[in-house]
Amino acid sequence: MNRGIVEVDVHGMNKYQAKTYLDSQLRRAGKEVYRIRVIHGYRGGTELKEMVRQEYGRKHPKVLRLEIGLNPGETDLVLREL
């Protein structure tokens, strides 16, 4: 795993737990971290995926932008450009 990318798995959490956990990871992210990969899944519903994309896409001051890849169960929070 790349040191600059932190993977955060929120499977099995409710929206409140996932948001609290993601907020703590964003606070703890040092200067070497440029991306947080959120693994939220998609087969059990889209509640976590929608929460991540709405809450962190525009509102969080540390998140520069979102990247949505080919895996529908993951969303990358880009903290800074490389």
Image (cartoon, rainbow, N blue to C red):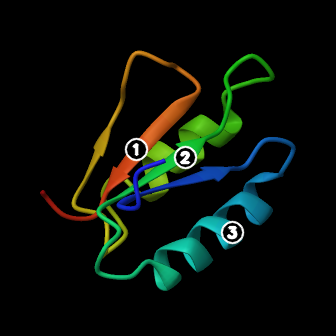
Taking the spot 58% from the left edge, 47% from the top edge, the residue there is 51
Relative to 18, does residue 9 appear above or below in the rendering? above
Residue extending farthest to the right is: 12
Q: Do residues under tags 2 and 3 come within 8 Å of each other at their CB atoms?
A: no
Instruction: Please tell me whether residue 46 is drawn above or below residue 24 in the rendered image.
Output: above
Q: Is there a contact, CB below 8 Å, between mark 3 and mark 1?
A: no
Q: Amino acid at mark 2?
A: Val
Q: Which residue is mark 1?
A: 76
At mark 3, the secondary structure is helix
Question: Residue 29: image x %, image y %?
Answer: 44, 77
- Per the rendering, the mark at residue 21 is 3
Residue at x 56% of width, y 73% of height:
25
Q: Is residue 65 above or below residue 19?
A: above
Location of mark 2 (residue): 38
SS state under label 1: strand
Residue 9 image offset from top left, x and y in percent: 69, 48
Q: CA distance from mark 1 to mark 2?
A: 6 Å
Residue contact between numbered discs 1 and 2, judged by CB atoms under 8 Å: yes
Tell which circle, 3 or 1, labels the residue nearer the N-terminal end. Answer: 3
